[in-house]
Amino acid sequence: MSDLTDKQLGMDRNIARRDFLNGAAMAIGAALVPRSLAAQTPAAGAEQNRPGYNPPVVTGLRGSHPGSFEIAHSLRDGTFWKNAPAPQKLAAEYDLIVVGAGISGLAAAHFARERVPEGKILILENHDDFGGHAKRNEFHLGGKLQLLNGGTMLIDSPTPYSPAAAGGLKKLGIDAVALEKKCTDRSLYRSLGMGSGIFFDRQTFGADRLVLGPRTIEGPESDSGKPQASAWDTFLKQAPLSEAARRDLLRIETQKVDYLPGLSSSEKKNRLSRVSYRDFLLTIAKVDPSVVAFYQTRTNGEWGVGVDAEPALDCWALGLPGFQGMNLEPGAAPRMSYSAAGYANGGSARFHFPDGNASIARLLVRSLIPAAMPGNSAEDVVTAQANYAVLDSPDSPVRIRLNSTVVGVRNLSKEEALDKRVEVIYATGKDVFSVRAGGCVLACWNMVIPYLCPELPESQKEALHYLVKVPLVYASVGLRNWTAFHKLGVSSIHCPGAYWNSAALNWVVDIGDYHSPRSPEEPILLHMSRTPCKPGLSAREQHKAGRAELLITPFEVFERNIRDQLARSLSTGGFDPARDIEAITVNRWPHGYGYEYNPLFDPEWPAGQAPHEIGRKRFGQISIANTDSGATAYTDVAIDQAHRAVSELLS
Ligand SMILES: Cc1cc2nc3c(=O)[nH]c(=O)nc-3n(C[C@H](O)[C@H](O)[C@H](O)COP(=O)(O)OP(=O)(O)OC[C@H]3O[C@@H](n4cnc5c(N)ncnc54)[C@H](O)[C@@H]3O)c2cc1C
């Protein structure tokens, strides 16, 4: 923490954010959200029909916001049914009920409609908005619309999109390659003399110092696009690191050393798959121990844990340094994670909509309920004003019901229904309802499913519990201007030891009627990310520890750390957190990325026996989607799993 007082940090400033009760405290002892609270948040009953209902503009604690998870947690804790009223039976019946309005759930409805165009579909979602992780953060800074992704950031996957996923995007009007070429400006910040920087914090490195990254300081880049030794030399001279650390960092970054001489490429890859990157640095490359702190959080954004829990081989695929002299053959190898193997072979096309993949969710909603999302192209959807009041209209064959947590799903017996049917029970802030359908796709988080379907075989429930999602936080911070960044020459900052792992000025994307700020005098959005974890534990245990931390962290702590870290890293450029911060939204994702197996900790399961494969098995008229059932965290996988789940039900 800095030496600045709360007042100097601006904690008392009246900015766009809402002061919330701590979400975890709300859950204690409560089966249902108390009426008083439900009335305060947009999570109350049919609130979505209220004029002006527009969740993307809500600031404060978003992501899994207060009001969205308490019911599910009370179901997990066994207290829900002790306090809940008897379900009210709804007369309307559906062909399909989808649980979860994330991209997988929306895509499931989309595929089901393609197969059965006259089918009636109900989508139930526990959050106050559709999209799941594909969440839109919408600000109006200086009277101008500015957007950021609250979760799912961009079209980007380790493998090219499958025919189902690519075909789905095409039908929505998305051509990622063409949009990237037309709309993304990757040169603006560079043209203003800005690049990346590293913020060394005094708790980790002994001094608070922002140092321009080696990519942005003088010295030509090599043919491979990597900065040359001279640029590293300049960078390291300014970094608050010991002589030994500087020497070894320079070696790791720039020298071609074969640290495993005498082994073939595949033997080296095998060896590197069995040690963490941290151990590679310490025991194979034999660096000074102080070097580790510089790299510790380099993998957090990709996997939610640091280099202590990521195999060196996966880090090689991700582009971490130290391998340039090891003559590793390009491409995937056995014992690599899904992401590392895919990226080692190439990856998909990339495109970032200003609100991330929330635009995909919005396009899916348009395809399902045209009146809810005016317009007709992937460009105009960015500025389209969603009409939430028609999402759950009785006249529409597809209905999306928000603020509705599913608490039970079961196959009905022959005595209960003539043909094969399911009963789905859901709770709002006030009431519990029972509704029937011909089938159900569970596109919700897979680890919730054992609580919804207690009749599942024990082995399937156990498999579903194995999938521990990765916790993350994305903050969107509205700034009055970005003159301090400009003055310092940084547009993005990596912060290896600090509370927030990174801070980056918004992407420059002009699409449809949406235009990114181009002058440092203009307001802008800053994206900050934090991946809470506990180095030293296995990846799954780190995710559990991170999630526990997130659920007890009040908004105020996130805010103070935003202000503090920006003050410490940018004050030499004139940044004043009290004056320059205009709005804050913290997207808290205790259940973030879908779990991806980690070769350091997870066994190699026989084909078809991995937890996600056992966990996603169809159960009567209930099938299972979501990225979790693909054991990874990508939009194409969410769509592919929806496609599979719908095909299973209709087969
Ligand atoms: C911070 C973050 C950044 C990401 N960035 C990217 C990226 O750049 N590119 C990419 O391809 N992927 C990214 N991902 C991965 C992302 O998870 C997937 O791409 C995709 O959006 C997941 O869609 P989904 O529908 O499978 O799951 P989700 O989006 O999680 O949707 C599932 C929905 O089900 C709801 N639900 C759960 N339980 C219940 C219940 N009992 N009743 C009702 N509803 C319920 C959940 O609340 C949720 O809204 C990111 C994820 C996170 C968290």
Image (cartoon, grey):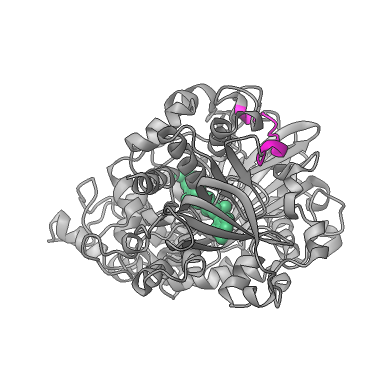
Query: Is residue 173 found left or right of 579 in the rendered image?
Result: left
Quadrant of res 88: bottom right
Quadrant of res 434: bottom right
Q: Tell me if residue 434 can be seen.
A: yes
Task: Identify the image quadrant of the C terminus.
Answer: top left
Can you give x and y, in whole percent of width and height, for residue 536 in the image? 44, 75
Task: Identify the image quadrant of the N terminus.
Answer: bottom right
Q: Is residue 530 magenta?
A: no
Q: Residue at x 54, y 26 (%)?
A: 378
Query: Is residue 121 found left or right of 268 in the rendered image?
Result: right
Q: Nearer the viewer, residue 259 or 305?
A: 305
Q: Tell me if residue 495 can be seen.
A: no
Q: Residue at x 58, y 29 (%)?
A: 509
Can you give x and y, in whole percent of width and height, for residue 253 in the image? 37, 52
Q: Nearer the viewer, residue 651 or 248?
A: 651
Q: Residue at x 65, y 47 (%)?
A: 129
Above or below for 494 versus 453: above
- Read off the magenta span: 381-393
Query: Is residue 298 found left or right of 192 in the rendered image?
Result: left
Magenta span dominant secondary structure: loop
Can you give x and y, in whole percent of width and height, for residue 127 in the image? 64, 53
